[in-house]
Image (tube, helix red, strand yellow):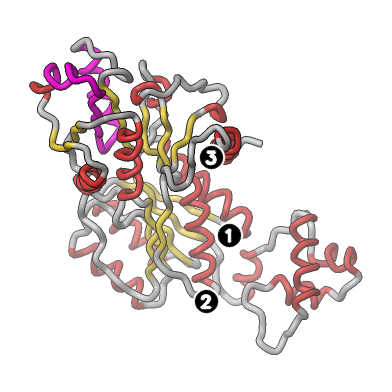
């Protein structure tokens, strides 16, 4: 394990200079030249230095631990979120304690434990609906100076966004509107003139898809299963959007049962990109929520707040994984880097001159997403 004294010895500097340069909240009078600070930070990164946050906090009577409350569901979204949080926290030297729950009662219990435990900040996911007890506890925690990074207070929250505002509360969301618009843009690019939406609890995604579809000149309304046989007799393919993969996989099974050639006369796009989308037959195109990236960014923002640096609300843009259900190819689960990524025509222009460059960008993106070298 690399220590400050090892970096000081490598650069032939005093340990106190190295300590000041790597201190996230240095004394105003402890000035280190910018050039020297850059040398020290480069050496620290090269030598794999990890600060002992716990020891530093304990010296001041505190605790560096981050408390994390996440949904008690076992799916790719939560798993990737935990991976991202864990990776970033390890890099920053902050210990983690995870709590999981499904409702406002679980969230109230988490807040009681957080109030009683010594820690440095909360990274939390809001319950579907916060009751008065949880709301008062949350308000009290913020008023007492606690730092909170709230994940997906707007997105993934079934049209019930968190209404609390406070200087110590910062939000980080997936940009659902952008993801739904990507789905519409992809279907328009595949020649769809008519699209249909499947309604669910994620109504904001459906509204955003419908708005973008109409902007692109497509006819869009809620799907009536009885009209499907007539729709697919048109020369252009018909597009269907479902705002959750659970809806998308159910629709895929129903369309196959009815004898439709999904991916040819009917193009289906969903949202969330759960693991089942790769293995379904045909494989399901879905908007990928980059929760691993979101988890890393959440820790970075919370650590900045803990050290008194300014932070503000932010969104993370999703992207579309194009598979067989919307005219793409079947992915290889053993080689996720072969997946096709669509980020929107303003980001990727598929011409003969740029196809190779865009494909390389896709491979790098997917390798990073799956933590591959």
The residue labelled by disc 1 is: 94
Q: Position of residue 46 (x, y in %)?
A: 78, 55
Which quarter of the rendered picture does the C terminus lie within? top right
The answer to whether residue 165 is left or right of residue 363 is: left
179 falls in the magenta region: no
Q: What is the magenta range?
A: 228-257
Residue 369's label in the rendered image is 3
Q: Quadrant of residue 110?
A: bottom left
Which quarter of the rendered picture does the N terminus lie within? bottom right
The answer to whether residue 29 is left or right of residue 85 is: right
Q: Position of residue 53 (x, y in %)?
A: 63, 65
The residue labelled by disc 2 is: 308
Q: Is residue 370 visible?
A: no
The answer to whether residue 333 is left or right of residue 110 is: right
Q: Residue at x 30, y 35 (%)?
A: 188
Q: Residue at x 37, y 23 (%)?
A: 327
Which badge, 1 or 3, is on the more N-terminal residue? 1
As displayed, is residue 248 above or below residue 293?
Answer: above
């Amino acid at each position: 394990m690399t220590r400050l004294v090892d970096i000081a010895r490598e650069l032939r500097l005093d340990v106190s200079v190295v300590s000041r340069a790597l201190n996230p909240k240095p004394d105003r009078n402890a000035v280190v030249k910018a050039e020297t600070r850059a040398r020290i930070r480069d050496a620290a990164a090269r030598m794999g230095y990890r600060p002992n946050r716990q020891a530093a906090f304990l010296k001041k009577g505190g605790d560096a631990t981050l408390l994390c409350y996440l949904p008690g569901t076992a799916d790719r979204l939560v798993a990737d979120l935990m991976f991202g949080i864990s990776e970033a926290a390890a890099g920053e030297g902050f210990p983690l304690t995870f709590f999981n729950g499904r409702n406002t009662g679980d969230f109230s219990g988490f807040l009681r434990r957080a109030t009683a435990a010594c820690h440095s900040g909360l990274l939390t996911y809001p319950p579907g609906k916060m009751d008065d007890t949880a709301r008062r506890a949350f308000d009290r925690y913020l008023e007492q100076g606690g730092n909170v990074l709230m994940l997906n207070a707007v997105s993934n929250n079934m049209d019930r966004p968190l209404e609390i505002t406070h200087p110590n509360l910062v939000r980080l969301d997936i940009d659902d509107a952008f993801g739904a618009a990507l789905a519409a843009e992809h279907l328009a690019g595949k020649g769809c003139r008519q699209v249909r939406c499947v309604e669910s609890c994620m109504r904001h995604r459906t509204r955003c898809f419908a708005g973008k579809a109409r902007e692109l000149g497509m006819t869009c309304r809620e799907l009536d299963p009885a009209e499907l046989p007539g729709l697919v007799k048109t020369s252009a393919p018909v597009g269907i959007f479902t705002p959750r993969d659970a809806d998308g996989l159910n629709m895929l099974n129903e369309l196959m049962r009815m004898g439709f050639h999904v991916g040819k006369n009917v193009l289906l796009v969903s949202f969330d990109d759960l693991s089942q989308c790769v293995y379904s037959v045909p494989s399901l195109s879905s908007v990928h929520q980059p929760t691993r990236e979101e988890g890393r960014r959440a820790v970075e923002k919370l650590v900045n707040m803990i050290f008194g640096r300014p932070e503000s609300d932010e969104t993370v843009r999703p992207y579309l994984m194009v598979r067989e259900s919307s005219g793409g190819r079947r992915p290889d689960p053993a080689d996720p880097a072969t997946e096709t990524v669509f980020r929107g025509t303003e980001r990727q222009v598929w011409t003969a001159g740029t196809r190779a460059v865009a494909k390389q960008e896709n491979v790098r993106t997917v390798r990073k997403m799956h933590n591959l070298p």
